[in-house]
Image (tube, grey):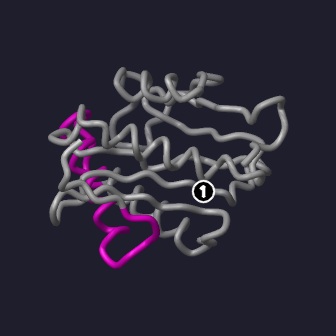
Amino acid sequence: MDDNVRFVRGVRPGYIGGIARMHGEYYATAWGSDVAFEALMAKEIIAWWERYDEHRDLLLTAHVGDILAGSVAIDGSQSERPGWARLRWFLLEPRFQGQGIGKSLIQDALAFCAAPRFSGTYLWTVEGLPQSLRLYEQNGFAVVGRESDDRYSVPHVNLCMERRAPNGGKYNS
């Protein structure tokens, strides 16, 4: 990994917009999504920020020089799955992929989840992203559901993946 990579924990000015922009640009290029997708990302990130609690939630960003290279978040407030953490907004700018930055982001996020507060971690990803799927599987996630989705301006299939805490209980620290 490049010595110029810096990892930052926490939300700072510019990160909410930067993460929404990064997702908007990536999925416009990769999938043909339009500005509606970026707006949805911004809306969801802002909603997460409004209930943010540093003991339950996490934002990790990777920076190369002054460039926001990647992000991952943990949302521990998920009422749809009480006791579980949701891994969200994991993305690495394509020019920084294959350097171990994404692996570090995921591993650090999962280390946060390893505190004895969550029964497991789940995420939603888009079908057709083999590199992401492989990284999630290498970190103990398995596909547990699929559903069609057209909210992102381009119809696609979402995959729900989960990683249960050992022995079905809370993660050990």
What is the x, y in percent for residue 20? 33, 59
What is the x, y in percent for residue 156? 41, 28
150 or 4: nearer the eye?
Answer: 4
Left or right position of 44 against 19: right
Image quarter in which the N terminus is found: top left
Identify residue for label 1: 75
* Tally of numbered tags: 1
Q: Is residue 54 above or below residue 64?
A: below
| Label 1 crowd bin: few (<14), some (14–19), many (20+), radius 10 Å | many
Q: Residue at x 84, y 38 (%)?
A: 169
Q: Main secondary structure of the magenta part?
A: helix
Residue 18 falls within the magenta-colored stretch = yes
- Looking at this view, name the residue that lies furthest to the front: 3
Q: Residue at x 60, y 56 (%)?
A: 75
104 or 134: nearer the eye?
Answer: 104
Quarter of the image for residue 133 reads top left
Q: Residue at x 76, y 54 (%)?
A: 117
Left or right position of 168 against 144: right
Amino acid type of disc 1?
A: Asp
Quarter of the image for residue 28 reads top left
Q: Residue at x 52, y 23 (%)?
A: 137
What is the x, y in percent for residue 81? 75, 46
Q: Is residue 150 above or below residue 148?
A: below
* Residue extent of the magenta highlight: 8-35
Quarter of the image for residue 171 reads top right
Please tell me whether mark 1 sits on a helix, a strand or a loop. strand
151 or 7: nearer the eye?
Answer: 7
Q: Is residue 95 above or below residue 164?
A: below
